[in-house]
Amino acid sequence: MVTQTEFTTFLENLGAFESGINPTKSYGPHDLDWLMVFDPNKGDVERSSIDLTNPEDLSMLQYHVHNTLGFLGKYQFGEPLLIDLGYYSPAPTGYYGSTATNEWQGTWTGKNGVYSKEDFMSSVQELAIREAFAMNMQIIEGRLAQAGKSIDDFLGQEFNFTFQGVPKVGEISISGILASAHLQGPGGVANLLLNGIVSHDEYGTNILSYMGEFGGYQTPFGTAGVDTLVGSDYTETFSGEAGDNAYFTGGGLDKIIITANANGTDVVKDFDINHDVISLANFSGLKFSDLVIINNSEGNAQIDLPNNQKLILEGIASNQVTANLFVQGPIVLGWNYNAGDKVIENFNLVHDVIDFNYAFGLNNLNLYEQNGSTIIDIVDSNQRFILEGIKYADLNAFNFIKAPVGFAEAFFGDTLPPPPVEDNDNSGEEPSVDNNEGGNNEGSDDNGGQVVEGNAGAYSFTWNWGARAVIEDFDVTTDHIDLKSFWTSYEQINFYNNAEGNAVIDLTNLNNQTLTLTGVSLAELSGQNFIGLSGVVSSVLGSNSEPAGNEDNVGNEDEVEVPPPVDQGNTGESHVYSFTWNWNNHQTIQDFDLSQDSIDLKSFWTNYSDFSIHNNAQGNAVIDLTNLNNQTIILVGISAAELSASNISGVTGDYNQALNLSDNIGGNNNQVLNSTTEETEVFSFTWAWGNRDVVSDFEVGHDVVDLRSFWITPDRVEVYNNSQGDAVIDLLAVNNQTITLDGISTEQLNDNSILF
């Protein structure tokens, strides 16, 4: 029986919403079929073995949920997160040797006993979500620190949001941040706090709704103030930050990370010497021998730190406190040329992990044993990490996370690799990326740890704090830099030439990361060399020869705002407006110049038959990407008739196909929609859990309801008359959502009234 705490209540509420199964409710025989819990192709749950009125059975069933995008379990895990956490290794089933997300055709590593998807459909998900929280918090804190901020700068700020159709006022809190990061990743939270960017998931769920609805709970993570940190029966990482904190671990194999807080006092109420450990990694150079350990007046162990800080372990005597209770973690490794040897003492094989943070390629690493200690050697950089007293044979692949592809096979096979032959030629030069002409750049190149994927000439990068990648032989006529994993714009990146005249793509504002193109100057680059960036390419790609510096991108600290429309003004210069996937985003462009400006949509990998170009009610051209991503681009003062194929790049097919789809696709998701023009009105809807929408003045034979954003077939939808005789389009089985056509009966509708 799990001990009930505020933190477990938070997780139960989050899991009920994520999975779609609330164990406090009862369900009918087929109410949960849409979650694929009884689908024999998805798992091994027998319908006859489950009592849909039993809370314990329903709790178990949460772990077996599959959604339409392949996300899995109580907390809807995807492949990328489980790769980061060390549970899963993807299969090369997608484009150019990459993985197609959430097909689950890869291999499971065996971490925490998980060797298959069936193994993962269990309570091990409770361990994984807690590991994800700890990882996400670490990333968020790093992103904020890079901008000179901390979480405490934002806590308590209020914002408006809507949850299940109900307007609410929320407040930024630690639990809200944890939930929001699980929805949109730590980068999504950092962008919300620093830049006011309100993002959505694939179903249109707003990050603010998670921040608000799941806010205000006690968690294992603290603030700069006085906190009560609460855990559960499961294994957790506690991080108290500053302030005088009280810890209630709740059980499990817990790690308590103590933050330096001179003259402060932390109290652990239920420390278990057989299961829990303490990390003093925030105290540089501190050793166990530096600690003063006594019994205080209550007979509890008191650990005095050099900064006059006290850590009290209630119920534990001073003679029970040994060096084995202290660990180093979290241990994050990165490039630091000519740093020499760093000794890591008291590495705990159960609690500690080495986080490579995707900073290294496989050929950048060597592991071996020397004098009874394991050596992690960063090849040709005069940089080593020594796990003192830890034998190589005692380690396994699960002691390492965010490692390069093939790491486990290379270093934890049947035969242990020998120490390297001494080589004094440690040049300390930065690793570089060579373009493999005529083939795929699969695996890991020497690019500061970034895994370069795709066809020859397509270099894909993702978050890699501190990496300094160098690309050689970049061909400006054919090659591309793919930055879509950063979900950012041209304006958030600094572009300049270094002292050698090489172009530098400086991501310092985002992630303390740079990409250098050897032999290519900034003047030679254009928007055609980049994939996945939004914004205006001409605003940043100029003849700059100096770094632009760190601009203040922290936004308004008092409120969260949606960025204003793009307005570059009529400068006489040509502009390339680049867009990427941004669910439910509706962007407006002012002063678009038909003679020289263009819209770059190559990040969508789409065809003209997949979207439409039409005029809105104001006569402005709308590039309508609703079918792709519920996204639109409006060109103020430009009509659809004035546009041509020369104004759009990165799209295949016949431009006229986009014009022929519809002249009037539009609408919105307001609670009550009114038809206000004599033209055909298309009322478009998307995922909005719990909404009860009403359409007024619907004209049969003229207007249509567009459900294409749901990606469903007609058999998933019920249409009937309510007690007032109004037609109801019932999406309850899909998303707990209904659309009512006021004054229209089902008998009046025809096959063309609803678009699927």
Image (tube, grey):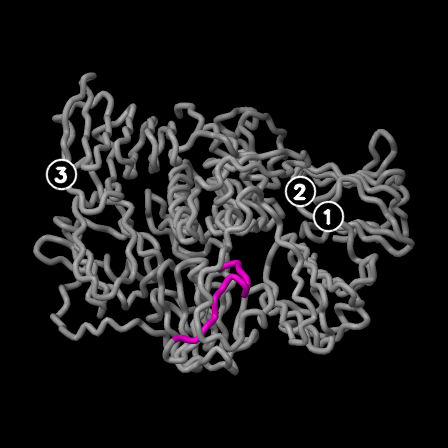
Classify mark 1: helix, strand or loop: loop
Q: Is residue 267 left or right of residue 101?
A: left
Q: Is residue 635 left or right of residue 414?
A: right
Question: Which residue does the numbered mark 1 point to in the structure image?
Answer: 685
In magenta segment, residue 493 = yes
Residue 649 to residue 145: above or below: below
Residue 227 pos. (x, y %): 38, 29
Residue 26 pos. (x, y %): 59, 26
In magenta segment, residue 272 = no
The residue segment tinted magenta is 486-498
Quarter of the image that includes the N terminus: top left
- Can residue 373 be seen? yes
Classify mark 2: helix, strand or loop: loop
Question: Which residue does the numbered mark 3 point to in the structure image?
Answer: 290
Look at label 2 and name its amino acid.
Answer: Ala
- Do tag 1 and tag 2 residues touch (Cβ < 8 Å)? yes
The quarter of the displayed image where residue 97 is located: bottom left
- Can residue 49 be seen? no
Q: CA distance from mark 1 to mark 3?
A: 63 Å
Question: Which residue does the numbered mark 2 point to in the structure image?
Answer: 688
